[in-house]
Amino acid sequence: MFSGCSSLNDIKPLENWNVSNGTDFSGMFSECSSMINIKPLENWNVSNGTNFSGMFYKCSSLNDINPLENWNVSSGTDFSWMFSECSTLNDIKPLEKWKLSENNFSGMFYKFSALNDINPLEN
């Protein structure tokens, strides 16, 4: 949807979007290299989402995914490349609450060069 919008840095207009029927969020913000703040996505109801692959792929300025902490992604089956090449992101603690099972995680943290603690993924 916004893939390749390298100058996009303000997504506040998406804050009240009703995405509750959405199932495929793949590549939605991929290569939005100027995007820093994803707080407007905090209250999105993504509970029907199954495909999150590459959603934030190459969002190289993204440094805080706390707004995703309470996302219900339990229906998700594909998280491949979701945060791949988010080179400034170093804290994945917000993902600690995500309930996941038998899914595709290939390349999810590929070239995640600032990551230094994977303990939040323990459970």
Image: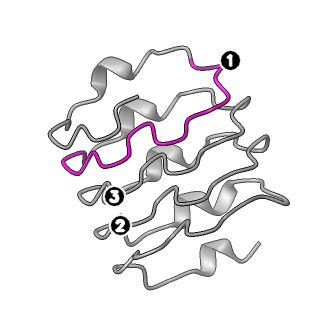
Report if the CB atoms under discs 2 and 3 are less than 8 Å apart.
Answer: no
Mark 1 residue type: Asn
Mark 2 residue type: Leu
The x, y position of residue 4, in whole percent, is 28, 41
Location of residue 100 (image quadrant): bottom right
Circle 2 is placed at which residue position?
89
Considering the whole magenta stretch, tell me its main secondary structure: loop
Q: Magenta segment range?
A: 19-35
Q: CA distance from mark 3 to mark 1?
A: 26 Å
Q: Nearer the viewer, residue 59 or 36?
A: 59
Circle 1 is placed at which residue position?
21
The x, y position of residue 39, in whole percent, is 37, 38
Circle 3 is placed at which residue position?
58
Element marked by disc 1: loop
Going from N to C along the chain, the mark reached first, 1 or 2, is 1
Q: Nearer the viewer, residue 72 or 32?
A: 32
Location of residue 84 (image quadrant): bottom left
The x, y position of residue 108, in whole percent, is 55, 65
Q: CA distance from mark 2 to mark 3?
A: 11 Å
Kindly identify the residue that appears in the image at 46 percent across and 44 percent down. 67
Q: Residues within 10 Å of mark 3 (few under 14, many from 20)?
A: many
Q: Is residue 56 left or right of residue 107?
A: left
From the image, state whether disc 1 or disc 2 is nearer to you.
1
